[in-house]
Image (cartoon, grey):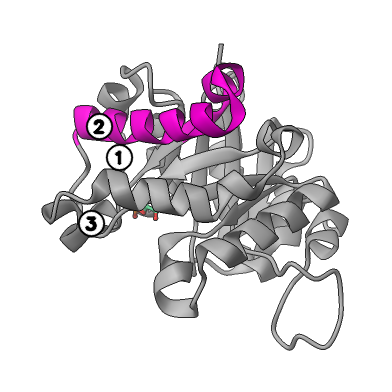
Amino acid sequence: MRKPIIAGNWKMYKTAAETAAFFEKFNPLVAQSTHCEIVICPTFVNLPAAVGAAKGTRIGIGGQNLYFVKEGAFTGEISGPMLEAVGVQWVIIGHSERRQYFGETDASVLKKTVAALDTGLKPIVCVGERLEEREAGKTADVLTAQFSGGIAGLDPAQFAKIVIAYEPVWAIGTGKTATPEIAADAHRVIREQAAKQFGKGAADAVRILYGGSVKPDNIKGLMAQPEIDGGLVGGASLDPVSFANIVNF
Ligand code: 13P
């Protein structure tokens, strides 16, 4: 059985004070929620506040990115060991916004995933097609190419430790959710690639999250698909009540 994960990606939102205020409201709302793993990924500067606020709870904290070198002259970057040192357990890698605005590629996604695993962090590796690619009927090709260029470069032991997030770019922040069937189809494509590369056992075990306009009112339908193992939530994770309602789907 794959234990669901509900993860919040806070993107570039919230100050340290707002982070503390969120957890104060959120923690009691999910105190009994043992059916899934809960992860929140704030900005780098708010990681210590989040780690402190989540202490003694089952909520895991993650970064939104990392650099693949441990330390050095890389102005503005943050490494895996630095994340680990502040008490972070998770890290999002290759989010479409990183690919679109910051030049990330499948090759850098692979390097970052390996770096995260070397540090003992659990990577949430993102894939997903853009609107024009979906409209051109290229969704499966794009997902396959992203898988081959990135995740397929892991060894089986590394693959066993990652989580994959399918985030169709056209559904992110647009209010357009993929229907549960569309999402499940894409998840099957990804799982087939995983089976080809790493074998059926490994493919059956890997958790694939859906991301893109997940809200309290659509999470139930998404989670009803056996292919969907959780959500990676942007906007709706910023409000404690809304995110708790998603966690408690
Ligand atoms: P929204 O939930 O705001 O569409 O964002 C999804 C996302 O990008 C999560 O990583």
Mark-to-mark CA distance, 2 and 3 = 17 Å
> Pointer 1: residues within 10 angstroms few (<14), some, or many (20+)?
many
Q: Is residue 183 magenta?
A: yes
Q: Are marks 1 and 2 in contact (CB under 8 Å)?
A: yes
Q: Nearer the viewer, residue 189 or 178?
A: 189
Label number found at residue 218: 2
Residue 84 in the figure: left or right of residue 138:
right
Label number found at residue 215: 1
Mark-to-mark CA distance, 3 and 1 = 16 Å
The image shows residue 152 at horizontal and vertical percentages of: 58, 45
In the figure, residue 180 lies in which quadrant? top left
> Pointer 2: residues within 10 angstroms few (<14), some, or many (20+)?
some
The image shows residue 74 at horizontal and vertical percentages of: 76, 85
User: What range of the chain is rendered magenta?
Assistant: 179-208
Q: Is residue 153 above or below residue 196?
A: below
Q: Provide the residue designation for mark 3.
A: 170
Q: Secondary structure at mark 1?
A: loop
Residue type at mark 1 is Lys
Residue type at mark 2 is Asn
Q: Earlier in the sequence, mark 2 or mark 3?
A: 3
Residue 242 in the figure: left or right of residue 82:
left
The image shows residue 148 at horizontal and vertical percentages of: 50, 49
Q: Secondary structure at mark 2?
A: loop
Residue visible at 52% across and 24% down? Answer: 4
Residue visible at 27% across and 30% down? Answer: 185
Q: Nearer the viewer, residue 90 or 117?
A: 117
Mark-to-mark CA distance, 1 and 2 = 5 Å
Label number found at residue 182: none
Q: Is residue 56 above or below residue 87?
A: above
